[in-house]
Image: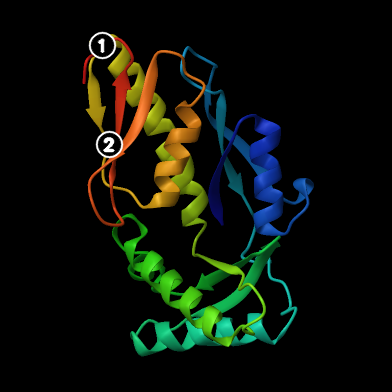
Amino acid sequence: MIKEFEGKTEKDAISKAVSELGLQQDEFDVEVLETVSNGFFKRGSVKIRVHVEGNNVAPLQMSFDNDLEKETAEFVSNVIEKMGFPGKVSVNFRDDRKIGLDIKSDHSAILIGKKGKNMDAIQLLANVYLGKITKADEKPARVIIDSENYRRRREDNIIRMAQKTAEQVCRSKNSKLMEPMNPFERRLIHTALNEMTDVITKSEGDGLYKQVRIIYKGSRE
C-alpha cells in the first residue's frame, strides 16, 4: 500500500502517517517527494510517500464512549445506506465538544462529493440528529464527518491556495476573489492571512457558501 502525507517538517509528516496508519515508524518506508522552504508568504512544508508492505493497516478507531455517539454513528450509517452507498462509520477523535466520525466506504468519492459538499450535507444531518437526541438541559456536541482524510487534505490545499493568492495580490496591488467556501473554510483563510501586513480579507456574498476577497491594503477596493 502507498499513501502520501504532508507536514511542516518531515518529522511532522511522518507523525501524521504513524497516527493515521496505526503503525510504528519502522513498519513502513518513507520517500520524500517535495520540500518547500519558508518564503515571504509561505510556510515550510514536506510531502512524503509512505510504502507499507501488505494491507494490514489498522485505521484509527475508538469504541463508542456513550449512547449518543453510538446512535449518531448508526444514524449516519443508515443515511448513507439509504443513499445507496453503504459503509462503516466509527469514531476517530473526541475534542472538547466535538466528535469525529469517519466513513469507510467503497463509495467514498461519491459520499465526499465535489469540494466536500455531499459530506457537508451528511454532517449537517448528523448534527441536527444529535441535537434532537441530546437532553434539553445539555449542550449538544458538534459532529465532524470525514472520509479518506479529506478534511485535512482540503485544509492544507486551502491554506496553500490562500497564500499563493495573497502573493499575487501583493504583486498586482489589487484584490482577488477566491472560490465559494463554507464558513469553516473561510475562517481558515482569514486566520492564515491575519498576520500578513500587506493584505486584508473579507467575505462577500449571501448564503452558506461565500467568497473571500483578498485585498491589497494600498488599493481602494
Q: Position of residue 115 (x, y in %)?
A: 32, 54
Q: Position of residue 193 (x, y in %)?
A: 45, 27
Which residue ends up furthest to the front in the rendered image? 137
139 vs 149, nearest the viewer: 139
Identified by mark 1, the residue type is: Lys
Which quadrant: the N terminus? Answer: bottom right
Q: Earlier in the sequence, mark 1 or mark 2?
A: 1
Above/below status of 159 relative to 193: below
Q: Left or right? Give the position of 144 relative to 183.
A: right
Residue at 68%, 41% in the rendered image? 14
Q: Within 10 angstroms of label 1, few (less than 14), some, or many (20 or more) residues?
A: some
Q: Which residue is mark 2?
A: 178
Residue at 37%, 32% in the rendered image? 161
Q: Label 1 vs label 2: CA separation?
A: 16 Å
Q: Within 10 angstroms of label 2, few (less than 14), some, or many (20 or more) residues?
A: some
Residue at 57%, 30% in the rendered image? 46
Identified by mark 2, the residue type is: Met
Give the colour scheme shown. rainbow
* Disc assigned to residue 173: 1
Task: Locate residue 198: give its quadrant.
Answer: top left
Secondary structure category for the residue under label 1: loop
